Image: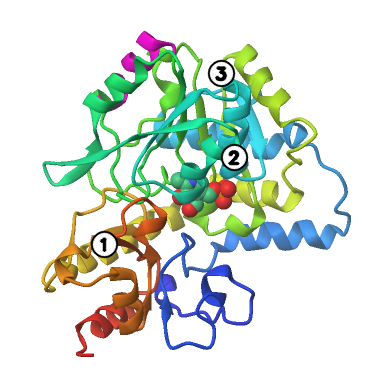
Amino acid sequence: MQFDQIIDRSESYAYKWLKYKGQDILPMWVADTEFKCPEPILQALHQRVTHGLLGYTLPAQHEAANQAVVRWLQYQYGWAIQAEWIVWTPGVVPAFNVVCKAICQPGDKVMVQVPNYPPLLAAAKLNQLERVDIGSVEENGRWTLDFAELEKQAADPKCRLFIVCNPMNPVGSVLTAAELQRIADICQQHGVMLCSDEIHCDLILEEGVKHLPAGNLATFEGKVITLMAASKTFNIAGLGASFAIIEDRALRQKFSAAAQGIVPWVNVLGLTATEAAFTACDEWHAQLLDYLRHNRDYLYSQINQLHGLRMLKPQATFLAWIDGSGLGVESPQRYFESKGIGPSPGADFGDKNFVRINFGCPRSQLERAIDLIKASP
Ligand SMILES: Cc1ncc(COP(=O)(O)O)c(C=O)c1O
């Protein structure tokens, strides 16, 4: 099985592996997987490099990459977009920072759900905005937004923007149709722009659960910003290629104007890889989801048997948000590290009682992690 293969990344300058270099700690933190990219992507990259010229390539003119995005969104989500709605960005992080600049004036408020991906939490301050946190609540075995708080905060005229992360990192929930509609209604009612970071949307693990792109919701009438990328799913984050889908022309121009002169074009290899990911890897993608689902189920059953640890089953992503408050230790992060495992510290996401474990790895590595946790000190 291709996903069982262990590939040594220790000499590849991998961010994930350098953190604990020289220590006997298994890195399970930053959100890239231990899986080799699908062959069609590697072949496409080889072919492009063999061509030998790597000069300027304007992403909007890379017809094949744009058509690949159009195909993927239709095929995965039944979302019929036009190629001109796509604005390529060299990462989702620059994209949501550009959104802050495009939509808000210094001093405005921006709502974000917590816990959340650290650069998303940081965006408000970086853009001289005030961050308003919308908490997460546990409901029927999954995390969801504190809608009462969202409703209350959105009513503040200073609140101009809501950056939502769907599927949610780190809690792994996928917004239901009713939840997304409720967000849309609240945003519409109060004139709040929605920016939906959907970088994890191609990683839906729970059978019967569907991802619904915000941009496909009629309520917004095209005035919403959806951010996506092939990077997480196909393990090509190092190539820095992502895209915003913005149907409304004026909003698209506003976004592009805020990026101008600061945000570079997506590099040609990122476009090549995205094209291949979205046209030639359907089977690989289905197998990946199956593998990750089994990893998730294994981790879920093991963690919840361990004293002091608890997790809910993530509906999507390869990330597990683990509550270590029952351990009775000062720092669950240090506890895991002392056991030989390096998760992401929950404090970085907004809750120091948690850690986030990346289960996008060969099963044997995950089993080793569980053995390490079980071993006595
Ligand atoms: C919610 C979310 N947004 C964005 C990113 C990173 O985006 P990029 O590498 O495209 O800037 C991540 C990576 O973990 C993420 O989890």
Mark on residue 53? none
> In the rendered image, which residue does mark 1 sit on?
296
Read off the magenta span: 179-191
Mark on residue 247? 3
Q: Callout 3: 10 Å neighbours few (<14), some, many (20+)? A: many
Residue at 48% across / 68% down in the picture?
35
- 230 relative position to 210: left or right: right
> In the rendered image, which residue does mark 2 sit on?
126
Percent position of residue 110, x then y: 46, 28
Q: Callout 1: 10 Å neighbours few (<14), some, many (20+)? A: many
Mark 2 belongs to which amino acid?
Answer: Leu
Residue at 22% across / 65% down in the picture?
324
Mark 3 belongs to which amino acid?
Answer: Glu
Q: How far apart are the alpha carbons under marks 3 and 2?
A: 27 Å
Q: Secondary structure at mark 1?
A: helix
Q: Secondary structure at mark 2?
A: helix
